[in-house]
Image: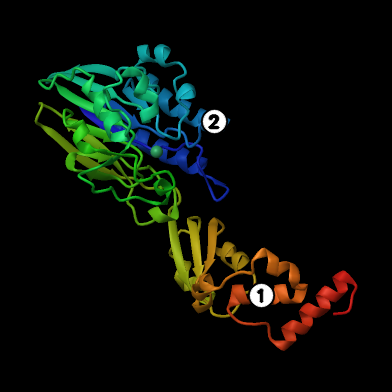
Amino acid sequence: MRLLHLSDLHIGKIIFEQSMLEDQKFILNQIIEKIKEQEIEVVLISGDVYDRSVPPSDAVTVLNNFLKILVKDLKLKVCMIAGNHDSKERLNFGKEIFADDGLYISSIYNGAIDKVELEDEYGKLNIYMLPYIKPIEVKQYFDEDIDVSSYHNAVREVIAKENVNEGERNIILSHQFVTAGGIEPEKSESETLYLGGTENVDISCYDKFDYVALGHIHGPQKIGRDTARYAGTMLKYSFSEVSQNKVLTIIDFKEKENLEINFIPLEPLRDMRVIKGPIEELTNEENYSLTNREDYIRAIITNEEQVYDAIGQIKKIYPNTLRLDIENSKSVQNTSLKISDLDNIKKKDEIQLFDEFYKYQNNENLNEVQLEIMKNIIKETKGVNL
Ligand SMILES: [Mn+2]
């Protein structure tokens, strides 16, 4: 059986006020083409289907069209679980209705893990679908003497409850923060916001499964063993992911012990990258003419002096600049400067406060000319003599 492992689609994601929907539609179409080329039979989607619990209506349309092509046009089986970003109840919509067509959804744990039983020339292949769970949610399904107080214990007990036939081939979908003997996967900004130290689940919980199709971490990678993998996202979703290569994870599962994993690179409509240097360099045609100017850009400007309308200058070349930062000797130092506390602020006049603000931003005091200009501005706006 040939399976495609996807996760963390985050459909409807917005990055710095920029909707990713056009990029998502583009990459989903590319995924559909690869699915046809590679003759994929089953698609696994390991959670965070949407980016938010209440996805915008156009995101719902995008997912609907993607699933419709997979299930109706290509006649594939699709197994999809909820991640921590998804609303369990909303993703659960139509579950029993769609299953007849080969779209299997599991978003709510109700005391047993949903299982899809498939068959090919090598025998049975069981696909267990464990949606994202929190210890508090599974407690009601266990006697009081069973400890499900941690994420690790909750997942371990939930799996232990199942009668996994290890003579058959078994795959599990899961969307937890899975670590291996205390070793954490390589994270990006997108996950560190949600991941604390207490949520980890050790990979040993999943020992009964021949392949562990994980979601949650945005960089594609294995965890603990070659056959336990985070699929990663289909697009870069934060500037901390710029060096990651997004891929499709394809699993060829023949006999029980015969499982092969291959990767196919994905080519986004727009890349996400960081450019850094003095503004003159960044806006020099020689440096950008061979690059895709439509890419999503974080520009780091290193000029020591103030740059007039830096964002305007950068956006003229890179219209999809999402973030601009200044990094020079002043900005490096200014974190050590302390801003006045509230009591002190009340005692200061406007010109003193502006002087402090200027120093905080630039690590130097206003010079006499600047001071004179500021005094005049404040005088004009307030109509008083300073
Ligand atoms: Mn997640």
Q: Amino acid at mark 2?
A: Val
Q: Nearer the viewer, residue 346 or 272?
A: 346
Q: Which mark is residue 108?
A: none
Residue drawn at x 23%, y 44% is 222
Please tell me in which quarter of the rendered image ligand 1 is found: top left
Q: Residue furthest right?
A: 383
Label 2 neighbourhood size at 10 Å, few (<14), some (14-19), many (20+)? some
Residue drawn at x 42%, y 32% is 49
Residue 56's place in the image compared with 78, above or below, is: below
Q: Quadrant of the N terminus?
A: top left
Confirm whether residue 37 shows in the render.
Answer: no
Question: Which residue bears the numbered disc 1?
Answer: 356
Within 8 Å: ligand 1 and the Cβ of disc 1? no
State the image coordinates of residue 174 (x, y, percent, origin top left): 30, 31
State the image coordinates of residue 334 (x, y, percent, origin top left): 54, 73
Q: Amino acid at mark 1?
A: Glu
Residue drawn at x 27%, y 43% is 264
Label 1 neighbourhood size at 10 Å, few (<14), some (14-19), many (20+)? many
State the image coordinates of residue 220 (x, y, percent, origin top left): 29, 45
Which callout, 1 or 2, points to the residue nearer the camera? 1
Counting residues from the start of the chain, the first of labels 1 and 2 encountered is: 2
Q: Nearer the viewer, residue 313 or 138?
A: 138
Callout 1 touching callout 2 (CB < 8 Å): no
Q: Is residue 11 left or right of residue 210?
A: right
Q: Which mark is residue 54?
A: 2
Residue 324's place in the image compared with 84, above or below, is: below
Secondary element at image label 2: loop
For marks 1 and 2, give the CA distance: 43 Å
Residue 316's place in the image compared with 21, above or below, is: below
**How many numbered marks are there?**
2
State the image coordinates of residue 46 (x, y, percent, origin top left): 34, 32
